[in-house]
Image (cartoon, rainbow, N blue to C red):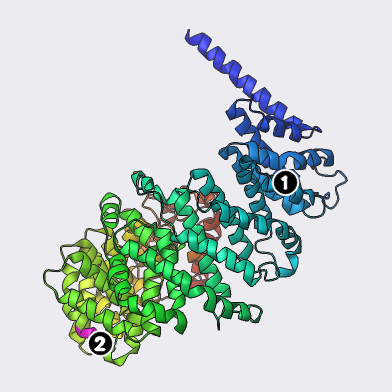
Amino acid sequence: HSCNTLELVEHLSKLSFKMHLFVFQSYKIINFAPTLLQIIMSEQVEFPVRQAAAIYLKNMVSQYWQDREPCVGEVVFPFNIHENDRQQIRDHMVEAIIRSPESIRAQLTVCLRVIIKHDFPGRWTAVVDKISMYLQSQNTSGWYGSLLALYQLVKTYEYRKAEERQPLLAAMQIFLPRIQQLVSQLLVDSTIFSVLVQKQILKVFHALVQYSLPLQLISNTVMTQWMEVFRSTMDRDVPAETLEVDEDDRPELAWWKCKKWAMRILTRLFERYGSPGNVTQDYSEFADFFLKTYAVGIQQVLLKVVDQHRQRHYVTPRVLQLCLNYLSQGLSHSLTWKHIKPHMQTICQDVIFPLMCYKDEDERLWQEDPYEYVRMKFNLYDDHALPVTAAQSLLCKAARKRRQVLPQMMEFCHHTLMDPSADPRRQDGALHCIGVLADLLLKKQVYREQMELMLQNYVFPLLNSPSCYLRARSCWMLHCFSLLRFHDEVALRNAVELVKQDLLDDKEMPVKVEAAIALQTLVSNQEQAKLYIRPYIRPVMQELLHVIRETENDDLTNVIQKMICVYNQEMAAIAVDMTQNLVGGAQLARGAIFDMFYSSVSQLFFARPPLGKRKCFALCDPGVGQHLAVRLHTTPPLSLLLTQPRVTVDRSSCRDGDSKVSGCYKLCDRTDNRKPIVDQIFFQALSRCHLRPHVKFSHLLITCA
């Protein structure tokens, strides 16, 4: 039985290989690509086969659709899909998108984008008629697929210069009135099909106006019709049954995505085209019209959405973030500010402040995975879409531009901190609000003179708080106010001592990360802090290396670089010991050349500790410190270490130097970008010492003897 099974497996493997070989050799045959499209469109073919054909066609179109010329010196033309095959695919691609299920559509829309990019308008003006035919039809089954096709057309021209968008604008003369009529007709229908069509129309409009606003296409009358669509979308309620969906999945529901795209359009229009004084000359007239005609009415609807969040009704984070961004834009104009002003204190205290507080989801993530918590808090790529980021921007801008906001918010935060029965999470929120306002507070004398006392009374005690998030927040506060001029040297010393303790002794990794950043900013900005930390530089640097190895946090890479710049003299003296710590106590050669070499190379390989019991620099592990090595290769700390006077070492310890060096340099070939770094360090070390190397260049990787 087992023998038969093995034979069957072998037979299937050979069959699979032959099929793969057949397909690989057949793709150049005329009519091969159109046949794939027929398979994709056929409902008689099993779905996995259709999906595989769609993926193959996508790859084929992406690679072979564009006309290509032979390279210099070659006479054979590279393969392109034959023009007859291209025409067949063009004729049926829109229909294929309409008739296919969602996962196959995703592949076909990529094909369509490639075809439009290379063939529209020159070879394929008919795509406009094809899409228009399905959009104008009363058969609703073709609407969504044709809108997907239209979206690919608009996306192709999304970031083109205005003078290069004429083919798109000519097409949109046909499409824009139809999709506006369609979305207005569907607004009263909250079924899933209707909402999906509405969402796709909003995505098309967003791509049309994202980079430039075609005023020749969108007159004031046309814009008024669209603004009513956006207002109605934001003003209508989401069906109650959506609350039965898990909260993490609700942002993916079509009803909320409709609101998200409407908000993206409104925010973009206000920021880029509708804000007088902040737009180019081309849009100045439109900006005046937008502000006077639409801005206040839309703002009233968004205040209603924000108030729903205040009353604990569900609003997706992305929609809330975009609403706050729109309100932030309105702070700059007296017309819109007049309508925000009565609500501003409520927004600050009941919307912004709770967003700044430590939340249940923060606690859950901290407890389950503190390393992921660190990554999330320092992730700049996702930061822009978070409500807390929008809340910070709104608070800072309001405090800077509207004089009533700052004193009211500071009084509120002060009362929260003074309340002995206050929830620790509200204390965290109060400190967070004060911290984001630090730059503004330090510029105003009336607040600047109180900040030192505030830190002593409310921040220093929390550095030893039993709540780990308050310890982290207190370190962050000292980072924010590191530029403050301390009048009491004892207070500064206490701050530095407490932050140092949190770095060295705290058991929570997020606290250590915040403490490391706070300590570096204090050392960089306070001369007395620099002097106080100097005797402790060895344990501080060792702990920094440990935290970086554990978290792989890029902000901490910058911290250690700056610390090396500040303490370059001290670093030269402890570099060897740091290296020994990194390689787990390995016995390293101690000669002048070697200690320079190790002290520099150690900077490259501290991203992770050595694997298992292997006692060597993990150069043969291709995952170790790759991106870190590239960065450190081009930064000052490396040069600083290489140019410092070296510590005195026992030269007798390296008389058997050859026995301390193993012939493993060839392993550097597997580390890509680190090999030239090792070369550079070694030769700089040689030039520094003016010594002739007594080992071969192939013997540079250090291991335990």
Q: CA distance from mark 2 to mark 1?
A: 73 Å
Residue density around tag 2, few if under 14, some if 14–19, many if 20 or more, within 10 Å: some
For the point 30% across and 77% down, the residue is 345
Q: Residue at x 44, y 71 (%)?
A: 299
Say whether residue 168 is left or right of residue 628: right
- The residue at the far bottom in this view is 445
Query: Which of disc 1 and disc 2 is earlier in sequence?
Result: 1
Horizontal side of 340 relative to 369 (left or right) equals right
Q: Residues within 10 Å of mark 1 (few under 14, many from 20)?
A: some
The residue drawn where x is 39% and y is 83% is 400
Three-letter code for the amino acid on which mark 2 is drawn? Phe
Q: Quadrant of residue 358?
A: bottom left
Residue 377 occupies quadrant: bottom left
Q: Viewer-nearest of labels 2 and 1?
A: 1
Residue sitting nearer the eye, 243 or 392: 243
The front one of 330 and 640 is 330
Name the one closer to the observer, 31 or 399.
399
Image height of 112 relative to 217, above or below: above
Q: Which mark is residue 12?
A: none
- The percent position of residue 700, horizontal first and vertical second, equals 49, 55
Q: Amino acid at mark 1?
A: Met
Residue 641 at x, y percent in the picture: 43, 71
Residue 526 position, x and y percent, is 31, 83
Label 1: which residue?
Answer: 133
Which residue, given by chain and number where applicable, does mark 2 sit on?
Answer: 486
SS assignment at label 1: helix
Element class at badge 2: loop
Q: Is residue 434 visible?
A: yes
Query: Which stretch did the figure color magenta?
Result: 449-453
